[in-house]
Amino acid sequence: MQKLFVLMSIWLIVLISGCGSNEAGTAANPQQLIVGDRSVALSLDPTGSTDSNYLVKIGAGEMLFKVDANGVVQPWLATGVEQIDATHWKIKLRDGVKFWSGKDVDADAVVASLERSRKLDTKAQSYLNGMNISKVDADTVGIATAIANMTVPLNLSNFQLIIHNAEKSYKSAEATDFTGMYRIQEYIPNQKMVLTINENYWGTKPVIPRVVYEQITDDQARTLAALSGRYHIMLNIPTASIKQFEDNKTVSLVSQPTDSAQTIYLNLRQPQLQDRRVRQALSWGLDRDKLILFGAEGHSSPITTWIGASPQYSDARNLYYDKYDLAKAGALLDEAGWLSASDGFRYKEGQPLTVRLMTWGTEKLLGEAIQAQWTALGIKAEVAHGSYNQIMTARDTGDWDASIEAWSTFGNAAALLNAQYAPGASGNYGGFNDEKTIALLEQLSKTSNKEEHHALVLQLSKHVAEQSPAIYLFPRPGVTAISRSLQGFAPHFRQIENVVTADLRITES
């Protein structure tokens, strides 16, 4: 019955997408690129905390700088950057760039864009913290930094900092104004986006006239849709589905290690999770090697710090939890007063030790594997698999214990770590508030020497691991299905923002 439902869902997706749009409904159509994903942006406002990467990956949004596949920061809307001294920079803007509306992307527009992001987007604040942004002249932006030798170009390459017309409302497709090669023509929240070529694009124009970007939330439906031959690109293929693509003549897979740390965020406001010993036990009690088999089909390796997923900090991978130790986990729970009873579960003052784990996207099997390992520890673990909207709602209400999520770890370490661990920061979902961590973050923000900076990152990461406000598992593998009729697709360790490019071509079969 479930498989029948999934098949019917795919049939409906193809039928609805094709009605009234002159679509050929096949990946052989060279006039349009069809992209599938597990989610489409909740809104078109680039200051929405989960929306910017969708706008960049589909060719609508652009930043001043961009990181290439080798991890090198390259100019994009900027033509270059000059460091005047330890705390002052000049960014030269590309000549002739315009927003879709025709408005010039000059220094005034760039300053207004970045300041709007600073005001409205908590994630953007992490990358702009310590920067004073001003106009030098019409095509030059000045940056004054609070600390010496801040990684300004790297910070400004983050997808949270899309350059956009700050005068627009972004409440509809008509009210958006970006600079990208494709312009949004139609948008249905959490369903679909249709884009056409921006004829006034400053760079190399794409060949494919139209892009259709569709949401398919169900993992199996996404897999079957990719295998159907309709989609040129299907993102977020679950690793459990990899074998279904073996020897397929129409679709191939691109599997690329990412810099996103698969993380179990813990709600430190919940009574049972306020005890550090309980949080440590939850981490010691996980066999990460087995979790990788269930959650990534073996396509990853264990990490026990968040920053350890970054290629810049591979030496931080196993600073604290260096092995699976069920006995140590049990001893910590005993010490915390959670004692085993005859039914195999742990109780304290008559109450069972419970953890409710929320999962979404491709993490269903991973969540179930975690549940089994925590149950073996004597914890009454529950798993609720649903949409990301449900996780966000639970966070807003405070009614959650744990949730799985993965965020990019590549970039300016001070900004990234601040976003994860500073009180009230955008990625500090569980309310972690630790004096030593705050002091180390402050010290890190003021350190410009590379060796000292690296050492501080390791020290901070080890300390946070000991405090265990979250549990780190492995870098999330990125698996993308590509139609064999599509040429020019480029794998990238940040595939989340590198999907649609001007190099893509569709060959008729």
Image (cartoon, rainbow, N blue to C red):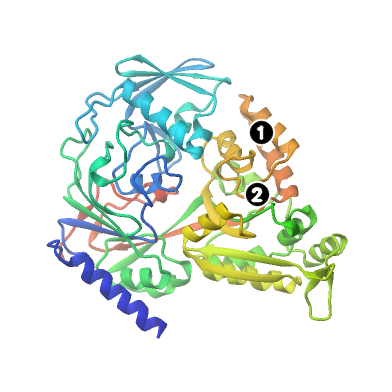
The reply to whether residue 297 is visible in this rendering is no
Q: Count the marks: how many?
A: 2
Residue 441's disc is: 1
Q: Position of residue 57 (x, y in %)?
A: 35, 48
How far separated are the C-alphas under marks 1 and 2?
16 Å
Q: Is residue 416 left or right of residue 176?
A: right
Q: Is residue 207 left or right of residue 311?
A: left
Q: Position of residue 432 (x, y in %)?
A: 68, 45
Q: Label 1: how many residues lie within 10 Å, few (<14), some (14-19) or many (20+)?
A: many
Q: Position of residue 187 (x, y in %)?
A: 27, 52
Residue depicted at 31% across the width and 38% down the height: 169
Q: Secondary structure at mark 1?
A: helix
Residue 230 in the image: above or below residue 71: below
Residue depicted at 56% across the width and 20% down the height: 146
Which residue type carries mark 1?
Answer: Leu
Q: Label 2: how many residues lie within 10 Å, few (<14), some (14-19) or many (20+)?
A: many
Residue depicted at 22% across the width and 28% down the height: 103
Q: Residue furthest left?
A: 22
* Residues under numbered marks 1 and 2 in contact, where contact means CB atoms less than 8 Å apart: no
Q: Secondary structure at mark 2?
A: loop
Q: Is residue 60 left or right of residue 446?
A: left
Mark 2 = which residue? 305
- Residue 23: name its quadrant: bottom left
Quadrant for the N terminus in the image: bottom left
Quadrant for the C terminus in the image: bottom left
